[in-house]
Image (cartoon, rainbow, N blue to C red):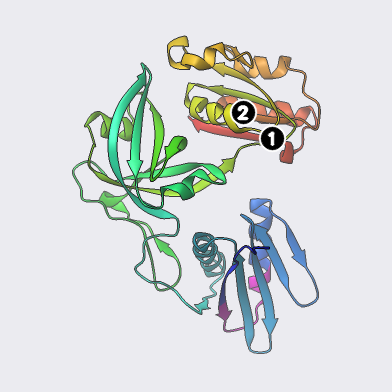
Amino acid sequence: MAHLRTYRSTGLIAQSSGAAIAALKARAAAWEVPLTETHDELTMSVWGCELRLVPHVDGMSVDLSAPEERLIGNLRDSATEIFAEVGLGISWDHVDAGALAPGLSLMRVLRVTRPSPGFVRVRIAAPDAARFTEGSMHFRLLLPPKGREPVWPRVQPTGRVGWPEGPDSLHRAVYTVADHGPGWLDFDIFRHDCSPTCDWVNGDPTGQTVAIIGPGGGGIPTAARVHLFGDQTALPAIRRILSEAPGQVTATIRCTSADLGDTASDPRVTVSDDLTAALSATAIAPTEFVWFAASADEARAARKHLQSRGHEKKDMTVAAYWS
């Protein structure tokens, strides 16, 4: 029987400090992730990884374990930041200083097409494209300011990731993998004004190199019964869930018929101009999963409504896709 590989990293805080324990507890509470405390260690579980804080006579060790190498890098970045906030530095066993940020891949734009009036589809390619098709559905597209050479985020000697600032700051919009094949990914951009991504794609980026980072932002819901609600910006994610979710799924979408395309004929799909009203009118059992993505105002209203109905956080994903 094959065993999944576990990646590890260890750091040392030179002094034992109650501040480190307090900082980790505060972050676990802020992120709303599990924290386990025993008489000899404190363990935070996040992203399928573990961060263990273990006191010793001459200091404290920070032990990291993760199922992916990129997640070790992400956890090292977060741990360094958590303890730096209370004035504590960490000496890591290994830091690949100068490397691209964990989870970042450089991709080449293969083509740009127009699948419907409101969307542009971009195909990008790289040898490691397949890793963005597993687990989470989303990634961040990193775009430099127009007219500037890209400065990509890289690992610093401290273990933190250094992101470009000022005139080199990157636009970091989130997109959904809409389709994929050997060595390539497709993602759809909803066309709208005042969007750096739309400006970029309108300039025909075919042949350019871009960076994406991830995957992240949640995967396909696996509940036996799933209710989807979303506007046109959520359409790519809704299509993925409709095609891949193992349970019974229905979707309520606010979108033009031209952009819905074949999705409009799916018997599981309903079109509505008022997503919050549609959510309120839908009979949803406490154990059924709700996925809602639209404007920030609608997301706040949806979250408040679900909480008022006693829906638990583990049984819902509510996201603001725009504001």
Q: Position of residue 305 (x, y in %)?
A: 71, 26
The boundaries of the magenta stretch are 11-21
In-image side of 167 versus 299 (left or right): left
Q: Position of residue 34 (x, y in %)?
A: 72, 56
| Disc marking residue 145 | none
| Vertical order, 251 against 44 (above or below) | above
| N-term mark: 2 or 1 | 2
The amino acid at mark 1 is Met
Q: State the image quarter where residue 12 is shown.
A: bottom right
Q: Judge whether residue 19 is colored magenta.
A: yes
Q: Secondary structure at mark 1?
A: strand
In-image side of 198 versus 60 (left or right): left
Q: How many residues crowd around disc 2 within 10 Å: few (fewer than 14), some, or many (20 or more)? A: many
In the rendered image, which quarter contains the N terminus?
bottom right
The amino acid at mark 2 is Phe
Distance from the alpha carbon under mark 2 to that under mark 1: 8 Å
Look at mark 1 in the image and give the residue it sits on: 316
Look at mark 2 in the image and give the residue it sits on: 292
Q: Position of residue 218 (x, y in %)?
A: 58, 42
